[in-house]
Image (spheres, grey):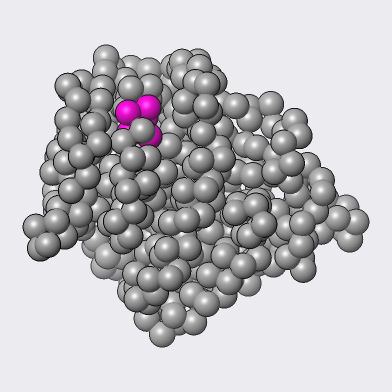
Amino acid sequence: MQKELVQDATTEPIAFDPIFFATRYKNELTNNILPFWMQHSKDEANGGYFTCLDRNGRVYDTDKFIWLQGRQVWTYSYMYKQVEERPEWLAFAQHGADFLEKYGRDAEGNWYFSMTADGKPLVQPYNIFSDAFATMAFAAMDKANPEPRYKKIALDTFENIIRKQHNWKGTFNKLYPGTRPLRNFSLPMILSNLSLEMEHILGAERVNSFIPTVIHDVMEVFYQPEHGLILENVTPEGRFSDSFEGRLINPGHAIEAMWFIMDLGERMGDKALIRKATDIMLQTLEYSWDKEFGGMYYFMDIKGNPPQQLEWDQKLWWVHVETLVALAKGFLHTGDPACGAWFNKVHQYTWQHFKDPQYGEWFGYLNRRGEAFLPLKGGKWKGCFHIPRALFQVWKTMEKIQQKNNAQ
């Protein structure tokens, strides 16, 4: 057992105790995060969820975003199956699924990006990640409450993603064709997790057929061994592009992908792959950690140039909670003390700066100094997904670490 000291936001320093972390993360999930969204986000009149919530949960905008609708359906149906079969969780997931099924797609089955409160389309289906999170939602609903229509929606949408994956913006692509074509890291990253979410529908054989290509793309094409980092964009041949997009590092994406890869490595019994993913995760964390104020930068330029994203130095909720998941899994699989030490450090920063002890839930956006500069708990991008998923993953991983300790 690691003995590094942990300064929790509401406790005295303690030894690195997996039981403590398992209990703390479980309680935060079940007693704070899930109740907050059930209390404040349900649209009783139209169906679906409001995600634009201010600090105390008041709805400040009623537009609905497919990413967040799908993610919230996934969260409650997943927790229903994995944590406890509470009827209210399943009913809450069903509430969102019904809205998505009724209003979320165009005639060709492509999922819109956003809608009005009553389901009128606002933004065209230009973004394949709307399809990805709808797939996750209905695959999880099919596990929680098996229905042929859920299975069909999930499978039809997944097949649509596979068909569009090499030109997924289609007519909505604003780039001039042929001048600087680039491949983006986001879709291979999502597919590495989405294929596992769909296994009960796709079957193990088909999922296994996806895995080598996904691992190759993530770990060989976008990973740059000379830097030890993952690029967000590469040329179609997998080469470096010395441009704003080509130099872009998104530490949160890279680290989140590494715990997806660890899960695939565990499935395959590939310890070398898990070790490589752990090393990339640690290298990315070291590279992106703000040595002056703490926390992880949002965007970086691999050559140290000024990033084009003006929000590059902000500290975002999802980056930090996904890092906690990756560190916990890295420690479980490798026992590397660096994972334990970094988990302590990231845990302290995350719980002290993002958690709102007064009104519940967590802040999403901090400035470089770690101060919350937007009082929202949800909006166009932040909803009920990254935090509950991460709390669950850390909770369960810490339990496995303790079981491993007990067996030694």
Q: Residue 351, percent across and down? A: 32, 27
Screen quadrant of the C terminus: bottom left
Residue in view at x 48 percent, y 51 percent: 281
Using the image as rendered, state which of residue 367 and residue 33 is in the foreground.
367
Is residue 349 covered in magenta?
yes
Confirm whether residue 190 shows in the render: yes
Q: Residue 263, percent across and down? A: 37, 64
Which range is magenta? Answer: 346-350
Placement of 198 over or under 388, stated as above or below: below
Using the image as rendered, state which of residue 358 and residue 160 is in the foreground.
358
For this orientation, the residue located farthest to the bottom is 205
Left or right: residue 7 versus residue 52 is: left
Placement of 397 over or under 14, stated as above or below: below
Left or right: residue 104 versus residue 38 is: right
Using the image as rendered, state which of residue 241 and residue 66 is in the foreground.
241
Residue in view at x 80 percent, y 53 percent: 241
Placement of 111 over or under 264, stated as above or below: above
Is residue 221 covered in magenta?
no
**Picture quadrant of residue 306:** top right
Q: Residue 210, percent across and down? A: 51, 76
Magenta: predominant secondary structure element?
A: helix
Residue in view at x 76 percent, y 34 percent: 305
**Picture quadrant of residue 353:** top left
Q: How many marks?
A: 0
Confirm whether residue 109 shows in the render: no
Residue in view at x 38 percent, y 71 percent: 271
Q: Residue 293, percent across and down? A: 49, 20
Placement of 111 over or under 347, stated as above or below: below
